[in-house]
Amino acid sequence: MKVVKVTRKRQITLPKDICDRLGISPGDYVKVSIDENGRIIVEKTLGLDQLAGILNPGFVLRGLAEELDRERKVSER
């Protein structure tokens, strides 16, 4: 078990050895949920670019996540 600190922005840093073991790299996506006992679960998940390829094989959408982030920031203004 590892103990990590939550920052002012409610962020945590995943320990390197755990990321290595799970194959999580910078830029990857993780899913965060709470189980029935109130514990936080963090799971590696597919990114938007990978999911788009599943729905339409052979059609690669590069930079989709970044484009969605830019649009979200613009709409927040």
Image (cartoon, grey):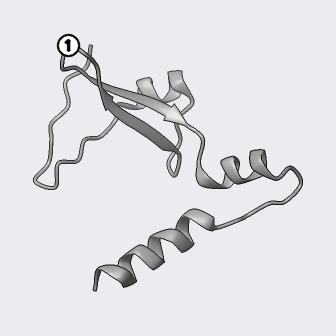
Q: Quadrant of the N terminus?
A: top left
Above or below: residue 70 compared with residue 33 = below
Q: Position of residue 27 (x, y in %)?
A: 52, 52
Give the quadrant of residue 12. Answer: top left
- Identify which residue is drawn at 20% across, 13% down: 37
How many neighbours does mark 1 have within 10 angstroms: few (below 14), some (14-19), or many (20 or more)? few
Up-down: is 4 above or below 21? below
Rendered residue at 40%/74% (across/down):
72
Q: Which residue is at a point 51% across and 27% down the rendered structure image?
A: 20
Q: Residue furthest right?
A: 58
Image height of 44 relative to 55, above or below: above
70 to the left or right of 7: right
At which x and y percent is residue 22? Answer: 52, 24
Q: Is residue 70 left or right of residue 35?
A: right
The quadrant holding residue 23 is top right
Q: Picture quarter containing residue 39?
A: top left
Q: Pick whichever, 9 or 35, lies toward us.
A: 35
Residue 68 lies, with reference to residue 55, above or below; the image says below
Q: In the rendered structure, which amino acid carries the disc numbered 1?
A: Asn
Q: Quadrant of the C terminus?
A: bottom left
Mark 1 sits on what residue? 37
Whole-percent x, y for residue 7 in the image: 14, 48
At 17% from the left edge and 48% from the top edge, which residue is drawn? 10
Count all numbered tags in the image, as a single digit.
1
Q: Secondary structure at mark 1?
A: loop
